[in-house]
């Protein structure tokens, strides 16, 4: 059981740190509370492949491996830049309001976001029952709660999923832009959430499914960094990037 000590039922692996008292939980949204990564992937895939048809016909299709390695967990424009750099494709930055036809970083990001919104409205997000159950339980026990996401769509996802009342504060892509914060793997988003909750980083537990997110938790000096590997296969990568423990469900975690 991942109890803030040095054991876990997830994959039996931890970094073995000694943790102090945890008074707050800060959870990533996608992959931890909700599953919208399929919708994100489909939107990214359509945008990038249409772009490649225009500017780089020799490029292969956008894959789930591309999504995990270059895009997942990052602010939207950072994801565009990372994928293009990996493919050796250079585009101008452009400006807000550009579309895909403009062949700019902003244009790709805008096209992806429009596609994602349509998919979200059509299909809605999947909510992980264990996450809602555990967060409501932790709140009843007196723990402070926050949600963190690199996405500007965090508020929309929570509203569509009926989870807007689950967290005391939300720090997301909108906050990042308004306050000039750095995206993951920088710890800025998590540190801002802890500040809003009035807790020191060492008194908060981070829950993340992305390697960039657990790395951010470790860089921020948080008391417990929990890697969430719901589908299996990424436990070692999460540990290597900074997770103290890896679990497959939040029901394994007692704080």
Image: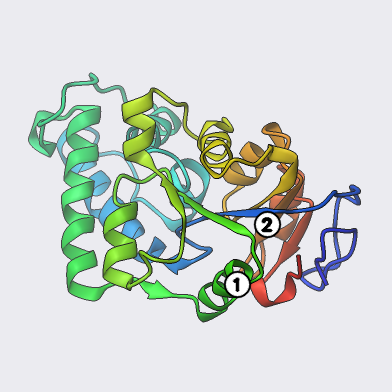
Instruction: Classify 10 Å Cα crowding around label 1: few (below 14), some (14-19), many (20 and above).
Output: few
Q: Earlier in the sequence, mark 1 or mark 2?
A: 1
In the displayed structure, 122 sits above or below 189; it is: below
Rendering coords of residue 233 (x, y %)? 67, 65
- For the point 76% across and 45% down, the residue is 223
Residue 106 as seen in the image, left or right of residue 247 = left
The numbered mark at residue 140 is 1
Point out the image quarter for the C terminus: bottom right
In the displayed structure, 126 sits above or below 102; it is: below
Closer to the camera in the image, 43 or 226:
226
User: What secondary structure is found at the residue carrying circle 2?
Assistant: strand
> How many numbered dots are placed on residues in this image?
2
- For the point 17% across and 34% down, the residue is 107
Query: Which of the two discs, 1 and 2, sits closer to the camera?
Result: 1
- For the point 18% across and 55% down, the residue is 115
In the displayed structure, 182 sits above or below 10; it is: above
Rendering colour mode: rainbow
Instruction: Classify 10 Å Cα crowding around label 2: few (below 14), some (14-19), many (20 and above).
Output: many
The picture quadrant where one finds residue 160 is bottom left
Q: Give the residue pinned by disc 2.
A: 227
């Amino acid at each position: 059981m991942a109890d803030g000590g040095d054991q876990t039922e997830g994959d039996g692996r931890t970094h073995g740190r000694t943790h102090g008292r945890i008074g707050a939980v800060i959870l990533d949204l996608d992959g931890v509370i909700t599953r919208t990564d399929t919708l994100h992937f489909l939107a990214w895939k359509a945008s990038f492949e249409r772009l490649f048809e225009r500017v780089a016909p020799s490029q292969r299709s956008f894959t789930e491996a591309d999504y995990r390695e270059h895009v997942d967990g990052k602010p939207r424009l950072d994801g565009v830049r990372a994928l293009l750099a990996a493919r050796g494709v250079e585009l101008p930055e452009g400006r807000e309001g550009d579309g895909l036809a403009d062949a700019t970083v902003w244009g790709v990001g805008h096209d992806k976001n429009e596609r994602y919104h349509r998919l979200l409205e059509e299909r809605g997000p999947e909510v992980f029952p264990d996450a809602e159950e555990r967060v409501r339980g932790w709140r009843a026990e007196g723990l402070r709660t926050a949600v963190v996401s690199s996405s500007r769509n965090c508020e929309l996802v929570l509203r569509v999923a009926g989870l807007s009342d689950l967290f005391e504060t939300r720090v997301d892509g909108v906050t990042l832009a308004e306050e000039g914060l750095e995206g993951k793997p920088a710890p800025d988003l998590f540190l801002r959430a802890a500040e809003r909750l009035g807790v020191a980083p060492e008194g908060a537990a981070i829950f993340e499914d992305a390697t960039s997110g657990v790395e951010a938790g470790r860089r921020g000096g948080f008391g417990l960094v929990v890697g969430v590997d719901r589908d299996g296969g990424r436990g070692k990568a999460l540990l290597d990037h900074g997770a103290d423990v890896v679990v497959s469900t939040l029901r394994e975690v007692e704080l």
